[in-house]
Amino acid sequence: MSNRAILFYCLLVFALSWTIQGFVISTYGNPENRMALPWLVIVMYTPALVTLGFAVFNRKARKYICWKPRWTLIPAIAVAVVVPILIAFATVATVEAYGWGRPEWFIFSPHNVVISGGPWLLGKGVQGWPKFVVNVLVTGGYFAALNALAAIGEELGWRGFLQGQLVERLGVTRGVVLLGLIWSAWHMPSLLAGYNYPEHPILGAFVLFPVQLVAGAFFLAWLTIQTGSFWAAAIAHGAVNSIEEGVTANLHMTAPHLYEDMTRIAMTVIFGVLFWILLLRSAARQALMENGFNDDRNLASTGQPIVSGTSTST
């Protein structure tokens, strides 16, 4: 697709999303209002709606949509669920260790965990660590899949379509960074109205959320590239919106809430850097394989060995 078509795609997604977000803010005041939830679900589906529109009216766009599930999706789903869980509990552990707050749902000890709140599928009360870990994984997987039904609306557009276009033009690093910034800016009206960061909306909209989403974009990019489709990214997005958000939102902070925000972002950045390195290594291996394939083709066609950086004579 042309650069002009990609720009038009982005502008159309922004126009639809910002219009609906503006309506929600003017009607309900706070995007967190429960009455606004159906409208926010529609907002989440604007990237998918525009992507499907492109697929209908632009035949060239269809081949760029990464939607076909493959067998590599199975192990990737496990990673998609586990990483948000690790970010959530690493945030909880850090906040508790530094005395910035305490978890309202859990009391941790060396031998067991007391669960006092939350929708845990294997129950609450006193649980040994093995049962607690299984409880968290089962509950996290269930709610990740459930919330993925809404996250599909974003991921079909961001990872399933736009990511490939940007990476093809800019490379992995710059393409994913730009996608993360676009993804963050797409939330801008709600962020400025206090969504996610009610105590510091300006800082959240222009600094905190962009950093978090750029880091998260590398994780979701790795899932998408490894599987060749957006489905694992949708599961991961669902896990972030459910178990990661649920666990961290139920921290009782004695320090300013910014401490929790910064901790969660720091944990996301750590994983983002890890998956960025994995993406670069994967890209390097692919380039090496392609160069080797081209060298083999040259050897077959000329009958002479290819020696990089040298010349031979007889």
Image (cartoon, rainbow, N blue to C red):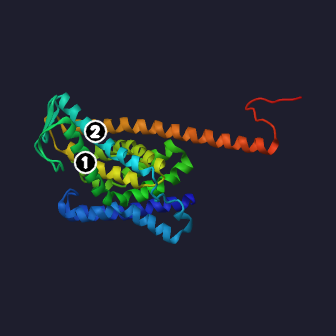
Q: Name the foreground residue: 163 vs 180.
A: 163
Residue that badge 2 annotates: 264
The spot of residue 290 in percent (x, y) is: 64, 43
**Camera-nearest residue between 52 and 137:** 137
Checking the image for residue 37, the label placed there is none
Decide if residue 163 is in sight here.
Answer: yes
Q: Which mark is residue 138?
A: 1
For the point 15% across and 30% down, which residue is it?
111
Q: Amino acid at mark 1?
A: Val
Q: CA distance from mark 2 to mark 1?
A: 22 Å
Q: Nearer the viewer, mark 2 or mark 1?
A: 1
Pinpoint residue 196: horizontal percent, then vertical percent.
25, 49
Disc with the residue nearer the chain's start (2 vs 1): 1
Q: Is residue 109 left or right of residue 285?
A: left
Q: Residue at x 40, y 66 (%)?
A: 49
SS label for mark 1:
helix
Q: Quadrant of the N terminus?
A: bottom right
Find residue 187 and report its image quarter: bottom left
Q: Where does the image place residue 275, in percent across and percent down from the top left?
A: 43, 39
* Badge 1: residue crowd in 10 Å (few <14, some 14–19, many ≥20): some
Q: Secondary structure at mark 2?
A: helix
The foreground one among 17 and 145 is 145
- Quadrant for the C terminus, please: top right
- Direction from residue 103 to residue 225 in the image, left or right: right
Q: Amino acid at mark 2?
A: Arg
Residue found at the far right of this picture:
314
